[in-house]
Amino acid sequence: MTSGEPLLEVRDLRCHLPGDHGVVRAVDGVSLTLGHGRVLGLVGESGCGKSTLVRALVGASAPGAGVSGSVILAGTDLTAMPPEARRAFVGRHVGMVFQDPMSALNPVVPVGRQIGEAVRHHLGLSRAAARDRAAGLLEQVGVPDPGRRLKHYPHQFSGGLRQRITIAMALSCDPALLIADEATTALDVTVQRQILDLLAGLAGDRGMGLVLVSHDLGVIAGRADEIAVMYAGRVVEHGLTRAVFARPRHRYTEALLGAIPRLDAPPHARLRVIPGAPPDLADPPPGCAFAPRCPAARPDCLAAPPPLVAEGPHAHACLYPADGAEITAGARRREGGDAG
Amino acid sequence: MAVGTLAAAPRARLGRAARRAAHLLAVLLLVTLAAAALVDLVPGSPAVAILGPSATPQQIAELDAAYGFDRPFPERYLDWVGGLVTGDLGRSVQSGRPVLATILERLPVTLEIALLAVGISLLVAVPLGVHTGSRVGGPLDRAVTAASSALMSIPVFVAGVVLIYLLALTTGWFPVSGWAPLTDGIAANLHFAFLPAVALAVGETPALLRLLRGDVAATLREDFVRTAATRGLPRRYILFRHVLRPSALPLVTMAAVVFGRLLAGSVVVESLFALPGLGGLALQSIPAKDIPVIQGLVVLVAVAYVAVNALVDLGYTVLDPRTRSR
């Protein structure tokens, strides 16, 4: 893969799912760019469209989903490929790790075979070579005694080891991009940390792009180079991790950061929560989706969804962003008026 | 076995073997009691039933003495079970030959037809079940569903007659009836065995197929199937490697039940094709009130059922590693 272009480029990706009360706009115009070897944290609360976005990225959307926009992986436009070819291409170049390792593993197939099967199909390795590779991968992800463990079944491993096995599966074809969708959510806190360190370490060692999807900013903070915050099917803020933490611009990001419990808070202080609930994606509000919960919302926030506007490497979709709000808001109002 | 490393596994396996043995004993006790009671259940005296209304009292007394029909139940039962243990099932009233030899002579025919019928059913049901289960509502699925409803409602003698007409009378590919034992060579043997086995399979295949279809459709909704798909594995590979095995457990149970049922012998098919099997033996023995033979057949069927169930247990541990440690 060449290095001139970004590893992953997503343009105006939409995924609309059929629902009981009309079409659910689960992903509604997401654009993202990820460089080679970069770690992106994709954050948002449950139901904001993170997982739907991930599925749409790899062409595994639910049947009946209306998907539009383009996904370009290292110069190859996936959305222009026929479905079977796309599945094979994504399977070869993108590794996926999911939330629940037990249900992601076939209970009646030995783990060695599950790790080696993709290698045999995509790289044409012999049975013996695939087994050796599977043993090597198990060793890399920290499963002790890999040679013997290859023959074991998923139920014979602990939760943390199972997730290590699914990571070995995801790495088996040496992917350029690894997507971990809530990969540590189902695990104990101590195991969570080990798995995150493992993922970040593997991405660094292999020069592999990594997308960490989580509802938990704390999970992502220390490992991601950049952060994209999703709300109601859109990316509302995207920037370098340090910049987003130091100076969140979107009011939703600000509220999310404020909701993280702090060790230096006085004892028995109430945890801050975001009042209200995310909007119904089958019937989203006409303006900014966060406006009904936003402390800084003004009447024009309710008119139309604000576009994602870049200020250098830091982009946000807020008319009255936090920190220096007045100046930017004025500039934005004029921009909006010209465009509209 | 990999699970042998877990401390609890051998004890669990032993416990299961003990349960299985207790189960076998309970079944055998009930079945032998019922079989022995047959003598008392025949209206009037069995000897009268066998000899007919014109029998003299002396003839009846002789027969009663020869077969012990006049002895009290507990004595008769213990005597019969004692014989059972040593392989002596008594003698046929009709032919005077040992019951065990009579049954063993006919068992291979029924066994072979039953095995062939189950084999043919699975050969058709597995690929079609996997395919229709993976494309529920597709054109092939609808065609197969319609065809299997039709086949399920065809009585086995109609299937047999149609098969004989089409594949034996009209084309001459297969013999109309009769039997060649395996000692005549496998080709001659299969030539005779094929049509009766197909006639039985016609009735059994649809249920097996639809069972597998439903389980395949359910397994396809599992997460591990979707993850296999995101890894870009070919569809056919996913179906046969990841979907079939977890979906096959109910199929194995059902196929075993079918096999157990066919082992008792199909009276209809054996009559239609003039096969010297157990079904034919039962057909001769029941009207003739040949109680020792009937008792032998009952015990054989019971043992076969228990044995088949033990095999299913074994099949489960092969198909699903999770059952090994339990």
Image (spheres, rainbow, N blue to C red):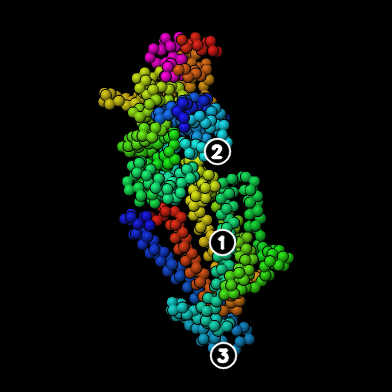
Q: Which residue is nearer to you in this view: A130 or B161?
A: A130
Q: At numbered mark 2, what does the secondary structure look like: helix, strand or loop?
A: helix
Subunit of mark 1?
B
Picture quadrant of residue A161: top left
* Start-end of magenta stretch: A311-330
Q: Are marks 1 and 3 in contact (CB under 8 Å)?
A: no
Q: Residues within 10 Å of mark 3 (few under 14, many from 20)?
A: few
Q: Which mark is residue B58?
A: 3
Inspect the image, locate mark 2, and give the three-letter code of the amino acid beneath it. Answer: Ala
Q: Which residue is nearer to you in this view: A112 or A120?
A: A120
Q: CA distance from mark 1 to mark 2?
A: 37 Å
- The answer to whether residue B62 is seen in the rendering is yes
Q: Residue at x 56, y 29 (%)?
A: A68
Subunit of mark 3?
B
Q: CA distance from mark 3 to mark 2?
A: 89 Å
Indicate yes or no whether the magenta region holds residue B295: no
Q: Residue at x 50, y 72 (%)?
A: B299
Q: At numbered mark 3, what does the secondary structure look like: helix, strand or loop?
A: helix
Indicate yes or no whether the magenta region holds residue A319: yes
